[in-house]
């Protein structure tokens, strides 16, 4: 069945190994295989499908645009689609949230926008070092990979990954304040041996790191440290932005304003390649074309993104996510935590994790496989891939959400009652 993939596609492919299914349709929170089998989607394109597959409102805007022979490729030239998108972003996101950012349209991937942020931080501060956190994932190009902590990803670089100092994330200690104390110590001690960084780069929720939700007080502490030492605060909101945590930006709950914000994945609204960097105006100092790329002006991305922003606004998606958060949390606490007291449940909004590390990290793979067998697409994350990660489209219907959670519950029960399977 998969002969042509085995023969012609590179060995680097990965997700298909966990999901040996040939898909051809998708709608809302359901994927359909070529033989008509339906699967509930708790993966959402690794966070690229927050608005669901083939969202009708967003799809209509894109089809209407295509049907009029509007310009598709324009690099960073002025276009009507970009003008409408910039106005929409300003009126529906920036003004209501009292934010003032310049928007940099980067290459089509999140890691490109991370690279832009790193270059811009170093250009502004004239420093080369940056701080990243244990458990971080920021991308697979060299600058982003240097700030990514997992050993498997880093081995792919083929050369030393430099100019990054890793510091403990909030959960490395029993008390999150110890992480802040460590940062303060290495910055204030003139014998720490660590150079003052251009930036501190972080995820407010480490998704690939195992669904680690930083306390808002810790985020506020990082902001204060950055202000004290003249360090730029860069938040990578690629996977947990665009309302995934219940707010449009994941950092809003902490009442902080980062100096730069990286967005990709669901920013296009429709799963189209798109990445942007939000920059406080005073740090927008690139000269023309100093960071560029052929596909940094995805016109269909602008159309889909504007439609997604309108959908978020008109459907009060933030409130919907917070309502569904309670459904997921209640189910996990009532149905899954009692299965084994060693299970660790954590999450926010519509990103949740079940951590098997205290039992056996490898059981997470068995749970994932059992879910797939029973019609649920779900992935793993974290140290030793011990965390089964719940990441459905934000638009998922309540009944489909509960059906998916029930499949997950039965998989956990089955695997823990038959751990040798």
Image (spheres, grey):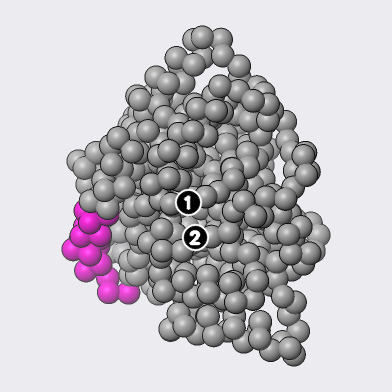
Which residue bears the numbered disc 1?
99
Q: Is residue 314 left or right of residue 122?
A: left
Circle 1 Cα neighbour tier, 10 Å, few/some/many (<14 / 14–19 / ≥20): few
Our reading of the magenta stretch's main secondary structure is helix
Image location (x, y in percent) of residue 270:
46, 31
Q: Nearer the viewer, residue 235 or 387?
A: 235
Residue 18 versus residue 343 in the image, above or below:
above
Residue 230 versus residue 294 in the image, above or below:
below
Which mark is first along the chain, 2 or 1? 1
Do we see residue 1 in this rendering? no
Residue found at x 57% / y 36%? 274
Q: Is residue 266 left or right of residue 310?
A: right
| Label ID, residue 257 | 2
Image location (x, y in percent) of residue 178:
50, 85
Q: Nearer the viewer, residue 329 or 68?
A: 68
Residue found at x 23% / y 51%? 323
- For the residues marked 1 and 2, what is the alpha-carbon distance in whole angstroms? 8 Å
Residue found at x 46% / y 71%? 220
Q: Quadrant of residue 28?
A: top left
Image quarter (top left, top right, bottom left or bottom right) of the C terminus: bottom left
Q: Which residues are magenta?
A: 325-342
Circle 2 Cα neighbour tier, 10 Å, few/some/many (<14 / 14–19 / ≥20): some
**Are the residues at dot 1 and dot 2 in contact (C-beta closer than 8 Å)?**
yes
Give SS at disc 1: loop
Give SS at disc 2: loop
């Amino acid at each position: 069945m998969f002969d042509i993939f085995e023969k012609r596609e590179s060995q680097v492919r990965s997700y298909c190994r966990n999901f040996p299914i040939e898909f051809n349709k998708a709608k809302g929170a359901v994927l359909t295989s070529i033989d008509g089998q339906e699967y509930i989607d708790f993966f959402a394109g690794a966070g690229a499908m927050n608005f669901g597959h083939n969202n009708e409102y967003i799809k209509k805007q894109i089809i209407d645009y295509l049907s009029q022979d509007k310009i598709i490729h324009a690099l960073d030239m002025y276009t009507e689609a970009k003008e409408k998108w910039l106005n929409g972003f300003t009126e529906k996101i920036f003004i209501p949230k009292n934010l003032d950012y310049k928007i940099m349209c980067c290459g089509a991937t999140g890691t490109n926008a991370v690279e832009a942020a790193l270059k811009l931080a170093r250009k502004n501060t004239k420093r080369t070092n940056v701080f990243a956190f244990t458990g971080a994932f920021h991308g697979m190009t060299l600058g982003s990979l240097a700030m990514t902590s997992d050993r498997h990803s880093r081995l792919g670089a083929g050369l030393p990954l430099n100019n990054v100092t890793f510091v403990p994330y909030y959960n490395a200690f029993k008390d999150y304040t110890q992480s802040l104390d460590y940062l303060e110590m290495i910055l204030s001690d003139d014998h720490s041996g660590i150079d003052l960084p251009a930036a501190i780069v972080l995820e407010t929720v480490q998704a690939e790191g195992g669904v680690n939700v930083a306390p808002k007080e810790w985020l506020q502490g990082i902001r204060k440290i950055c202000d004290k030492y003249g360090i730029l605060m860069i938040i990578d909101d690629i996977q947990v932005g665009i309302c995934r945590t219940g707010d449009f930006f994941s950092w809003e709950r902490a009442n902080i304003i980062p100096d730069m914000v990286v967005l990709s994945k669901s920013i296009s609204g429709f799963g189209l390649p798109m990445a942007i960097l939000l920059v406080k105006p005073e740090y927008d100092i690139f000269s023309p074309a100093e960071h560029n790329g052929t596909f940094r002006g995805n016109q269909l991305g602008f159309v889909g993104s504007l439609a997604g922003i309108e959908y978020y606004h008109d459907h009060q998606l933030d409130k919907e996510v917070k309502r569904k958060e309670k459904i997921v949390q209640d189910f996990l606490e009532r149905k899954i935590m009692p299965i084994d007291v060693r299970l660790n449940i954590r999450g926010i909004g519509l990103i949740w994790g079940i951590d098997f590390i205290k039992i056996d990290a490898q059981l997470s793979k068995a749970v994932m496989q059992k879910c797939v067998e029973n019609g649920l697409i779900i992935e793993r994350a974290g140290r030793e891939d011990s965390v089964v990660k719940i990441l459905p489209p934000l638009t998922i219907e309540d009944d489909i959400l509960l059906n998916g959670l029930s499949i997950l519950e039965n998989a956990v029960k089955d695997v823990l009652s038959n751990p040798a399977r």
